[in-house]
Image: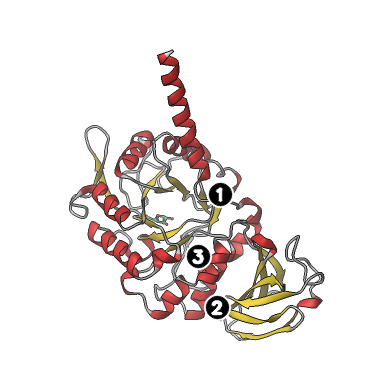
């Protein structure tokens, strides 16, 4: 009888952890990651300063919860196979960093790789998945980004499933970020294995540029998301890579486009800039509560490209409560003199939203005010490479 009770307790605890895993990331994860700005230059000092900054500059309040250390925190394995943290950069070990981050009200994330070595040649988790997952749980890790360098011909789904199983059994709910760059169509198998999956090669801090090794600018990444809409939803998101907002390579309007479109795409919002010294414009973008609300909307639908007019596009993201966010995107380097007649719209933005059946208020998410109704024309100059994004809600 006693044995049976113990078995039942074990069963219950295992299934409750499994349930918790499924329940994580019901809205796209938000946080900060060290890679885009700092590369391998990570340390306890940097992470603690970033945690302080997130609390003091309104980022945490705006919803950015996960603080993630990317590649280069690890140096070797000890004789028992345990992963060894760089003792010079993290002199108090990783648990101390996690504790500090948690005390600030944030969650703590870390990085590893499905291959034998990470993209920067540090030890990967291949062959050590369960041991590493237990170590992460012991440290207090809440989020794991898991890369795909040096994969040595492994089957991607199987490799990610092994780490997923390890996380599900490690005794701590950990969000699992599949960073496989879209090479093996993770949107087709990632649901249930991880909570988000990269869909492209690495983002570069530019509006439109491509690199031989696969790096992409914002516009090319957006173009690759249009076909993936049906794969995203609560608990399983397409990840077009982390944000470059504030890193200096784009104009204010281009960064607004980058941020707005990531919100429309229900993408994870992982800031990648130096949060200790954000300028006013960067802060205005990253903490725009109206745009973030579209990203975090409970319905969890990724926007569809509703209309493609070549250089001009209209994207629509259905929201909870029968509302919809509509984004007008100007790909050109000239202003788009928009003069839009909602009534000429023959398509439905979403099943419940029709400008022909009801009248809607048009709320501009960057001006933070109503700019008319759907019975009016929407008139605005949209700057080069810029967007106009509005939210339609039924006039009561
Ligand atoms: C890959 C990933 C990046 C980053 C680096 C770290 O390129 O796609 O996001 O994690 O590795 O080496």
Callout in the foreground (1, 3) = 1
Q: How many marks?
A: 3
Q: Residue at x 31, y 70 (%)?
A: 276
**Residue 85 vs residue 353, the one in the foreground:** 353
Q: Quadrant of the C terminus?
A: bottom right
| Neighbours of disc 2 within 10 Å: few (<14), some (14-19), many (20+) | some
How far is mark 1 from mark 2, CA to CA? 28 Å
Residue beneath disc 2:
366
Q: Position of residue 80 (x, y in %)?
A: 24, 32
Residue beneath disc 1:
236
Residue 300 vs 395, above or below: the answer is above
Callout in the foreground (1, 2) = 2
How far is mark 3 from mark 2, CA to CA? 26 Å
Q: Circles 3 and 2: CB distance less than 8 Å?
A: no
Residue 64 vs 7, above or below: the answer is below
Please say whether residue 338 is visible from this viewpoint. Answer: no
Q: Is residue 378 left or right of residue 10?
A: right
Q: Position of residue 211 (x, y in %)?
A: 47, 65
């Amino acid at each position: 009888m006693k044995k049976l009770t113990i078995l039942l307790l074990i069963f219950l605890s295992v299934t409750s952890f499994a349930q918790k895993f499924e329940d994580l990331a019901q809205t796209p994860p938000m946080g900060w990651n060290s890679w885009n700005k700092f590369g391998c230059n990570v340390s306890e000092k940097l992470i603690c300063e970033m945690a302080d900054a997130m609390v003091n500059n309104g980022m945490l309040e705006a919803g950015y919860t996960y603080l993630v250390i990317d590649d280069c925190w690890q140096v070797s394995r000890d004789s028992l196979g345990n992963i060894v943290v760089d003792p010079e950069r993290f002199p108090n070990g990783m648990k101390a960093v996690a504790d500090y981050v948690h005390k600030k009200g944030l969650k703590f994330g870390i990085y590893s790789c499905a291959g034998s070595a990470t993209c920067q040649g540090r030890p990967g988790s291949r062959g050590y998945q369960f041991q590493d997952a237990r170590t992460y749980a012991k440290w207090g890790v809440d989020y794991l980004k898991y890369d795909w360098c040096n994969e040595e011909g492994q089957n991607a789904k199987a490799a990610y499933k092994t780490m997923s199983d390890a996380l599900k059994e490690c005794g701590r709910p950990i969000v699992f970020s599949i960073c496989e760059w879209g090479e093996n169509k993770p949107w087709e198998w990632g649901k249930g294995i991880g909570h988000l999956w990269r869909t492209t090669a690495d983002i570069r801090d530019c509006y439109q540029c491509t690199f031989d090794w696969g790096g992409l600018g914002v516009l090319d990444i957006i173009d690759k998301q249009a076909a993936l809409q049906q794969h995203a939803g609560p608990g399983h998101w397409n990840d077009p890579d982390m944000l470059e907002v504030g890193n200096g390579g784009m104009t204010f309007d281009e960064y607004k486009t980058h941020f707005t479109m990531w919100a429309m795409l229900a993408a994870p919002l992982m800031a990648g800039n130096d949060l200790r010294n954000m300028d006013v414009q960067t802060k205005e973008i990253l903490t725009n509560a109206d745009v973030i609300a579209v990203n975090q909307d409970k319905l969890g639908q990724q926007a569809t490209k509703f209309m493609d007019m070549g250089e001009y596009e209209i994207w629509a993201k259905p929201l909870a409560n029968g509302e919809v966010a509509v984004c007008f995107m100007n790909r050109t380097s000239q202003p788009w003199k928009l003069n839009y007649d909602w009534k000429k719209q023959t398509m439905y933005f979403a099943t419940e939203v029709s400008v022909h059946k009801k009248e809607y208020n048009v709320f501009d998410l960057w001006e933070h005010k109503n700019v008319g109704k759907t019975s009016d024309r929407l008139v605005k100059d949209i700057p080069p490479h810029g967007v106009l994004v509005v939210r339609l809600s039924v006039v009561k």
